[in-house]
Image (cartoon, rainbow, N blue to C red):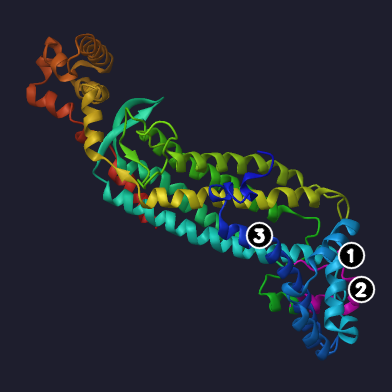
Amino acid sequence: MTVNPADSSVYSAVYGSDAMRAALGERSYLAGMLAFEAALARAQARLGLIPAEAAQAITAAAQVDRLDLAALAAATRNMGFPTVGLVKQLSALAGPEAGRWTHWGATTQDVLDTALVLQLRDALALFAADLDRLIAAFAAQARAHRGTVMAGRTHAQQALPITFGYKVALWLDPLITMRERLAQLRPRVLRLQFGGAVGTLASLGADGPRVAAELAKELDLALPAIPWHVARDAVAELGCWCGLLAGTLAKPATDVMWLMQSEVAEASEPAAPGKGGSSTMPQKRNPIGCEYVIAQARAAQGLVPQLLGAMLHEHERGAGPMQMEHLALGQVLLLSHGALATMLPIAEGLVVDADRMRRNLEAGGGLIMAEAVMMGLAPHLGRGVAHEVVHHACEAAMAEGSTLGAALAREPRVMAALDAAGIARLTDPAGYLGSADAVTDAVLARL
């Protein structure tokens, strides 16, 4: 496909989210630019710098639906940015007298960056709300399956028993941290940009700081100590946060996808008619949601270096980095929120098969309990000898197709230290969960 899937009318159903597209779309951007110009006029009118009637007329004229988008596109093609064309149209709509006072003391970067911040305020609200939902969904799963024993796997093989609640807690904990990080970066991102041509507000003389403070109040944005025309660390930080969120979401998506394998079948995405179906194999139910979480996560992470590269601005206004940022930031936000929005119904409707988890544990013939048996024998035989004895019993069980318990019962050194009840106790997965419950509870306590 030759177009960006996230922007296509068909593939947008599985890439990105409609809510984020609306928050970051052209209409909201133009509305943000107009909101800046109207707020600037009102702030300056309150300070007595422009006529109150002019501010009223500019505010009334600052409506997206009144813009000539074709003319604005032509002006943007000529100037490189839409600000000049937008201010020209706004001035005309406000009338000849009021139009003289539009954009008073501002520069293109002020309008573009503040409009971006207004969009980001909506974007961060979307992330926060959906993160809360996802955290609540995983917390509910962790509580419900605190005692559901399953195989813990390392290197794609059964290793030691865990609980499914513990597994979900491993997904949940970094999401709680991501929510904390979002709250921490919010004040660094939602700041007014207002500095004039080179950041000194020279065109407003001594009134510059007063106008900036009043404008920040008008738009309900933080007032930075200095204009950030060429200091893009907050934008880059948001991009990095999106990359971290993407990776955090890809982890549970990957686990669920592997748990959905036919041979495992311990958990799955919620079922729906035709969901994850195949065009030729009627039996198939593919982990399609997980696949799109992972794809969007990797794509979002791939754009983060571009945002970091866009931090390099020359002198008091860069030549090119802003355009790089424009190309990357929207896609990073859209794809990372798309991954989050796709993960939500998976988490909220996750189907867990506790019986299958137990059967898969038993299918291994108890070999998953080898460490437990070794540690149980170590006080009697010494760790090295216990390891050798249990390793021999594991090989015998695998060769014979029997259980670890049966192989151990034939080992004289084992029977000298343990009776049948002791072997049964050491080979029970539910008895070798370590601190699984404690750490699951510790994660839930973070809520």
Q: Which residues are magenta?
A: 193-213
Q: Is residue 36 above or below residue 382?
A: below
Q: Quadrant of the N terminus?
A: top right
Q: Earlier in the sequence, mark 2 or mark 1?
A: 1
Q: Secondary structure at mark 1?
A: loop
Per the image, label 2 sits on a secondary structure element best described as helix
To which quarter of the image does residue 377 belong?
top left
Front-most of 437 and 4? Answer: 4
Name the residue located 56 percent from the left edge and 42 percent from the top edge: 297
In this rendered view, identify the residue nearer to me: 251 or 394. 251
Residue type at numbered disc 3: Leu
Q: Residue at x 21, y 37 (%)?
A: 355
Q: Is residue 395 magenta?
A: no
Q: Left or right: where does residue 232 sit relative to residue 345?
A: right
Of labels 3 and 2, the one closer to you: 3
Q: How many marks on residues?
A: 3
Q: Quadrant location of residue 405?
A: top left
Circle 1 residue? 197
Q: Residue at x 20, y 24 (%)?
A: 376
Please say if the residues under marks 3 and 2 sit with CB atoms less than 8 Å apart: no
| Residue that carries the numbered disc 2 in the rendered image | 203
Kind of residue indicated by mark 2: Ser
Label 3, on which residue?
Answer: 24
Task: Give the mark nearer the N terminus: 3 vs 1.
Answer: 3
